């Protein structure tokens, strides 16, 4: 098990993330995580319809096979609404799968992901967004540099 602390330029609060790779699954827990902002309009059963979920409180995982450009973005909200994108070129070429192939659970301040992976070498990006308007805070696994953009594969870290 590996522990990563997500940091934000807007606050000294940190979010602890636990990573565990086991057989063909990756387990990720964000804790403690206090959600404030959610929207019930998003679907619990049709994740393809959850475009814009990132404008509310979410935990996000980006996964990329080493030496490939394509990566996947996984999100979950406080109401356990999910969203998944396959990204071929950030903001230009992407695909929304018809079915989310990952499992999430929200329980007592812990947001959990279970994502199927193969034996490839992987790179990962870990992020969270909390709050609204000027109070919104952005958390990432890399040192905040003032650029609010998680679609920066060059900042992803190797998943051991």
Image: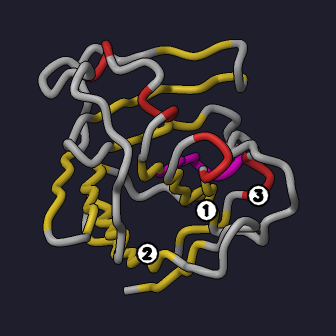
Residue sitting farthest toward the front: 134
Crowd rating for badge 3 (residues with CA inside 10 Å; few <14, some 14–19, many 20+): some
Residue 4 pos. (x, y %): 53, 80
User: Which structural element holds mark 3?
Assistant: helix
User: Which structural element holds mark 1?
Assistant: strand
Please report contact status of discs 3 and 1: CB closer than 8 Å, yes or no: no
The image quadrant of residue 9 is bottom right
Q: How is the image coloured?
A: secondary structure
Q: Could you tell me which residue is drawn at 49 percent across and 38 percent down?
A: 73
Question: Along the polypeptide, which appears first: circle 3 or circle 1?
Answer: 1
What type of secondary structure mainly makes up the magenta span?
strand
Residue 130 on the magenta segment: no
User: Which structural element holds mark 2?
Assistant: strand
Q: Nearer the viewer, residue 1 or 150?
A: 150
Q: Which mark is residue 17?
A: 2
Q: Is residue 24 visible?
A: no
Residue 65 on the magenta segment: yes
Asked if residue 19 is positioned above or below residue 93 in the image, the reply reads: below
The image quadrant of residue 13 is bottom right
Magenta residues, as a range? 61-67
Q: Could you tell me which residue is drawn at 19 percent across and 18 percent down?
A: 46
Residue 104 pos. (x, y %): 20, 50
Please report contact status of discs 2 and 1: CB closer than 8 Å, yes or no: no
Q: Could you tell me which residue is drawn at 29 percent across and 66 percent down?
A: 27
Left or right: residue 102 versus residue 20 is: left
Q: CA distance from mark 3 to mark 1?
A: 13 Å
* Label 1 sits on residue: 139
* Label 3 sits on residue: 155
Crowd rating for badge 1 (residues with CA inside 10 Å; few <14, some 14–19, many 20+): many
């Amino acid at each position: 098990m590996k522990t990563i602390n997500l940091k934000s330029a807007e606050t000294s609060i940190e979010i602890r993330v636990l990573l565990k790779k086991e057989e063909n699954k990756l387990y990720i827990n964000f804790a403690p995580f206090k959600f404030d902002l959610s929207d019930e309009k998003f679907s619990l059963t049709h994740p393809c319809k959850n475009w814009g979920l990132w404008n509310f409180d979410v935990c996000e995982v980006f996964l990329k096979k080493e030496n490939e450009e394509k990566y996947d973005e996984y999100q979950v909200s406080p109401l356990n609404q999910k969203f998944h994108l396959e990204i071929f070129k950030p903001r230009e070429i992407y695909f929304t799968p018809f079915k989310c192939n990952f499992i999430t659970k929200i329980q007592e301040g812990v947001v959990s992901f279970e994502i199927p992976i193969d034996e490839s070498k992987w790179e990962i990006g870990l992020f969270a967004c909390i709050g609204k308007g000027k109070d919104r805070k952005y958390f990432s696994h890399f040192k905040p540099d003032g650029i609010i953009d998680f679609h920066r594969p060059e900042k992803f870290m190797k998943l051991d």
